[in-house]
Amino acid sequence: MIEFKDVSHRYQNGQDVLSRLSFSLAHGEMAFLTGASGAGKSTLLKAVAAMLRPSSGQVIVGGADLATIRGGRIATHRQRIGIIFQNFNLLHDRTVFDNVGLPLVIRGWRHQDIARRVRAALDAVELLGKERVYPLTLSGGEQQRVGIARAIVAKPDLLLADEPTGNLDPEMAQDIMGIFRRFNEVGVSVLVATHAIDLIRQLPYRLIHLEHGRLSEQGPVSHGDLHV
Ligand code: ADP
Ligand code: ADP
């Protein structure tokens, strides 16, 4: 699903944030990306989502070499990925329904089809019945579930999450990780950047650890091979 070959990245005036990284995430695999704040986890996820172009090396996602795709095909690439953020990134002046449906509105879907998909997405995160409420009336955990529903509403092959539980208490955090596991169980590839080590240590997934721009692997291998 994801393959990095010798990928390096430096921001202007900086040192290498990613340093000759090579790794892969198999189709249908779930893994956690760990590392201290500033280790480069967001940078790596942005490279996967084609939100930044690494300084060198090759990033291949879903068979597409991101260095060679341009313009409209970058938008299409991003549409195949669901992204979940630490701060939920919800629109506070729109209802839950409108937040979750937004990716489909952007694609020009018909209202009827949007409504069907939004309900299915809200059902998957156990928020059916909250369509008409505004995000700020919900708990943090519920807001993040709205963020997840928005990320999965277009049925992406790959979910990326950047510190999705960073603003949540441990119980809600565990709940959110459980939701990612359920999507993974039905075939979605999942890569979650987190430093909530206590939360994930006991889970049966690969931990890919980023330090000084380089990767090392810790913890169990679920399925698929890691090539570091
Ligand atoms: P993490 O997600 O692990 O906290 P990031 O990928 O956000 O790490 O950041 C890695 C390093 O790159 C940090 O030192 C950060 O300050 C720097 N950095 C991130 N984004 C930018 C940017 N747009 N311009 C310059 N430096 C950046
Ligand atoms: P995150 O929670 O993902 O680590 P940050 O708060 O570090 O986010 O960064 C927020 C935004 O600012 C991101 O888009 C990141 O790329 C950018 N950024 C982070 N560090 C720097 C930096 N040193 N210089 C410029 N932009 C940065």
Image (cartoon, helix red, strand yellow):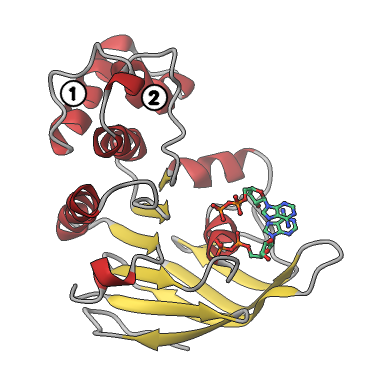
Q: Quadrant of the N terminus?
A: bottom left
Residue 131 in percent (x, y) is at 22, 16
Residue in the image at 31% along x and 38% along y? 144
Q: Position of residue 32 (x, y in %)?
A: 35, 69
Q: Position of residue 8 (x, y in %)?
A: 69, 75
- Disc assigned to residue 49: none
Q: How many marks?
A: 2
Instruction: Check whether the beta carbons of the residues at disc 1 and disc 2 lie within 8 A of each other.
Output: no
Quarter of the image for residue 193 reads: bottom left
The numbered mark, 1 or 2, whose residue comes first in the sequence reads: 2
Mark 2, secondary structure of its residue: helix
Q: Which residue is mark 1?
A: 119
Quadrant of the image occupied by residue 128: top left
Describe residue 13's horizontal placement relative to residue 106 as left or right: right
Nearer-the-camera pick, 73 or 171: 171
Decide if residue 82 is on the left or right side of residue 65.
left
Please, is residue 103 above or below residue 110 in the view? below
Other-residue count near label 1 (Cα within 10 Å), few / some / many at <14 / 14–19 / ≥20: many
In the displayed structure image, the side of residue 200 where residue 182 appears, left or right: left
**Residue sitting nearer the eye, 30 or 111:** 30
Residue ID for mark 2 = 104
Figure check: 88 above or below 95: below
Determine the residue positioned at 87% across, 65% down.
13
Please say if 61 is above or below 118: below
Type of the residue with mark 2: Leu
Q: Nearer the viewer, residue 48 or 211?
A: 211
The secondary structure type at the circle numbered 1 is helix
Q: Is residue 47 left or right of residue 110?
A: right
Q: Residue furthest front?
A: 169
What amino acid is at disc 1? Arg
